Amino acid sequence: MRPQRDGLDILIQDTDQIEMVLADRIAEFGQRASLFRTFPEGIDWLILLYHWQKNRGSVELHAYYRRVLQSDPRESVALVRSQLGLYIPGPYTNDFQAEHYKNLVLLANPDDVYRTLAKIGGSELTPEYAKLIKQFKTLHERQQNTPASKVDRDSD
């Protein structure tokens, strides 16, 4: 940040550039380490992922998550669970719903998450997580069977 004479106007003009620099640094860090394992408390890692996606798009982020999920399948459970912590208009729910699925799709390819979750045994999950995973899988399977999603997958 440079010195300012007349308040925040210079900073405000540079906000887009600052956001891109931050997104670049998040992506660089993601090449070396898992954001979830580095920031396990709260949803700081999730905020960083959404910032990355907002400024650099989903393609690179999906590749990051593909690598992460291959190295640690349990992170797929954390990703599904984390979506409940996001604000969705309406009352809080502890069920994985279509809005949660749409948010998750920004961060990771749902096919990758689905395949990774298949590797996790039910005995490794708490009853709450098992319920969320089942709900995610049901939504994903339903999404795969809609004509619009088949067209989207064919274009990827």
Image (cartoon, grey):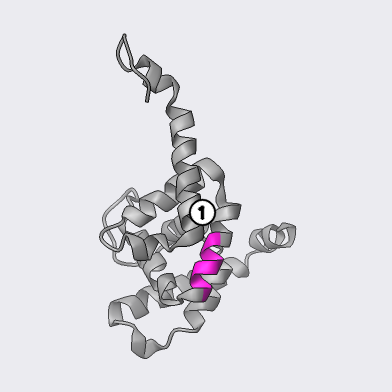
At x 56% / y 59%, what residue is drawn? 62
Q: Main secondary structure of the magenta part?
A: helix
Q: Quadrant of residue 67?
A: bottom right
- Quadrant where the C terminus lies? bottom right
At x 58% / y 70%, what residue is drawn? 111
- Magenta residue span: 64-70
Q: Quadrant of residue 61?
A: bottom right
Residue 80 spot, x, y in % from top left: 40, 67
Task: Say above or below: 107 vs 112.
Answer: above
Please give left or right for residue 78 compared with residue 24 in the image.
left
Residue kind at label 1, given as amino acid type: Leu
Please give left or right for residue 90 compared with residue 151 in the image.
left
Residue 103 spot, x, y in % from top left: 45, 55
Task: Say above or below: 130 vs 2.
Answer: below
At x 39% / y 73%, what residue is drawn? 77
Please give left or right for residue 95 compared with residue 61 in the image.
left
- Quadrant where the N terminus lies? top left
User: SS at mark 1?
Assistant: helix
Of residues 148 and 13, the one drawn nearer to the viewer in this rendering: 13
